[in-house]
Amino acid sequence: MGIYLGKGLLMIGRVWREKSIGWVASVLGTILAILAVMAMPVVFGVSDGRAAAPDAATEAASGADDVVATVNGTEIRFSDIALAEEENAAALARVPADVRFEYLLSLLIDRRIVSLEARAHQMQDDPGVRRRLAYFEDKALRDVYWVSLLNGELSEEVLKEAYQKKYVDAEGEEEVHARHILVASEADAQAAISAVEGGEDFVEAAKRLSTGPSGADGGDLGFFKREDMVGPFAEAAFALEAGQISDPVQTKFGWHVIKVEERRQASVPDFAAVRDQLTFELAQEKGQALMKGLRANAKVEISGAPVTPGQDTAPQPAP
């Protein structure tokens, strides 16, 4: 659905991409992830997340809310593009980054044309419109207020205290650099061990046998701390000296043969390098506590739900 609006539009698009990459997506991701108490994805216990950032209203207030188009005399602003990015985050994953601005602007132009036509036909009081307005007003109030609540909990002082506790105070924690071969059965793991003991290079054996995503890299997992891995894997890896190979190790992912390449004391990362991750982790923790408190003070009744004495019938926050 791309459109071509000349050099001026492409220039605006470049400015937009510089301003908004990871910004609006991270706002929505943090709001919804924390509100729903959504667990962070884990692969071998290594987590990934997104950090909260200013919302479109903040950018507009700072003077960045430029008019990017007009439709029949009505303005479409940068903040509209930003909110459309937030709303369409899932669909945008399939749109090349260099045409996302044009895609969103085209979408908003079409939407404005149709909405102006609807107003001309006096659709403002249609029951379907009023129902949707009430629904999205509720969502907008929730989103903006939730961000303000979390921002009040995530001061620079709080982030630096978390950094001190998690990284500085933990200085000296050990890391290992390991490779592994992931297979489906204990017999397959034992066969991999026999191949390596018989002279095959561990890297080549991993490339040939491992079913895990690291197999193409010779099973290389890089450096990791004990808590980064699932329990049985971590116990086996940290029991090995550099150059040693484990017996077969079973985890929920399958059977592993582990080789430790190197051991070292963990270094302390710069605050700036982990600030976003700390922000997400604290937002999840504090958001969960905030939601629990708000729910505790709310009277929720589910129509038709069976009532058990002493039991709360309200559903729990979505996983």
Image (cartoon, helix red, strand yellow):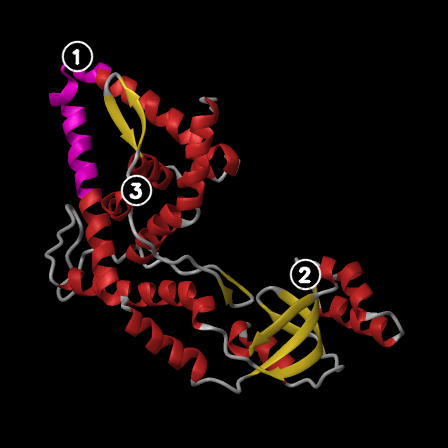
Q: Which residue is mark 3?
A: 64
Give amino acid for label 1.
His
Q: Nearer the viewer, residue 225 or 100?
A: 100
Residue ID at (38%, 49%)? 23
Query: Which region is colored magenta?
Result: 117-139
| Vertical side of 161 occupied by 44: above or below | above
| Vertical side of 164 occupied by 251: above or below | above
Q: Residue lying furthest right in this view?
A: 199
Q: Which residue is mark 1?
A: 121
Residue ID at (36%, 64%)? 279
**Quadrant of the image for the C terminus?**
bottom left
Q: Which of the numbered marks, if any, corresponds to residue 272?
A: none
**Magenta-colored stretch includes residue 125:** yes
Q: Nearer the viewer, residue 20 or 191?
A: 20
| Vertical side of 226 occupied by 1: above or below | above
Q: Which of the numbered marks, if any, corresponds to residue 214?
A: 2
Q: Mark 1: few, some, or many residues within 10 Å (few <14, many ≥20)?
A: few
Describe the element under mark 3 as helix, strand or loop. helix
